[in-house]
Amino acid sequence: MYEYDEEVLNTFLEKQTQLFSEEVADSLETAEEFLEDCMAVVCKNLKEVRDYFDEAGTDIAGMSDDELLEQSEVFSLPSGRFLIVEG
């Protein structure tokens, strides 16, 4: 099981409506449970984000870095890492 730190949980709480039409979590605890349930992944850089989508079989060929980061399931974290949540 992956441990989500406070930065990940707070960012997801703040930005969850970029992926979902309504809030799915209202506290750090429910955010952590939700992220665990969907097996959300934290990537340390953009290369890991690309690798994640490649391994998942998502067609991202030809996508620029900016286009990749505009995907609704990619959440940019203040530290420069990225959270990927499959809706």
Image (cartoon, rainbow, N blue to C red):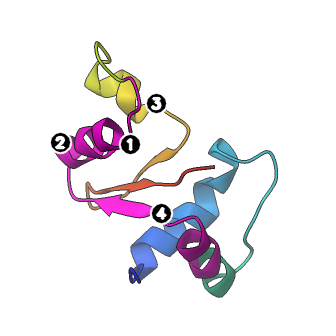
Q: Secondary structure at mark 1?
A: loop
Left or right placement of residue 48 versus residue 69 in this view: left
Residue projecting furthest to the top: 62
At 17% from the left and 42% from the top, the residue drawn is 47
Q: Quadrant of residue 53?
A: top left
Residue of label 1: 56
Q: Earlier in the sequence, mark 4 or mark 2?
A: 4
Q: Neighbour class for label 3 at 10 Å: few (<14), some, many (≥20)?
A: few
Residue of label 2: 47
Q: Earlier in the sequence, mark 3 or mark 2?
A: 2
Q: Amino acid at mark 1?
A: Ala
Q: Is residue 66 above or below residue 69?
A: above
Q: Quadrant of residue 66?
A: top left
User: How far apart are the two marked residues, 4 and 2, measured between alpha carbons?
Assistant: 17 Å
Question: Do residues under tags 4 and 2 come within 8 Å of each other at their CB atoms?
Answer: no
User: How far apart are the two marked residues, 3 and 2, measured between alpha carbons?
Assistant: 15 Å
User: How far apart are the two marked residues, 3 and 1, measured between alpha carbons?
Assistant: 18 Å
User: How far apart are the two marked residues, 4 and 1, measured between alpha carbons?
Assistant: 13 Å
Task: Tell me the number on the disc at residue 70.
Answer: 3
User: How far apart are the two marked residues, 1 and 2, measured between alpha carbons?
Assistant: 14 Å
At 38% from the left and 35% from the top, the residue drawn is 57
Q: Earlier in the sequence, mark 4 or mark 3?
A: 4
| Range shown magenta | 32-59
At 37% from the left and 29% from the top, the residue drawn is 68
Q: Earlier in the sequence, mark 4 or mark 1?
A: 4
Q: Is residue 27 above or below residue 17?
A: below
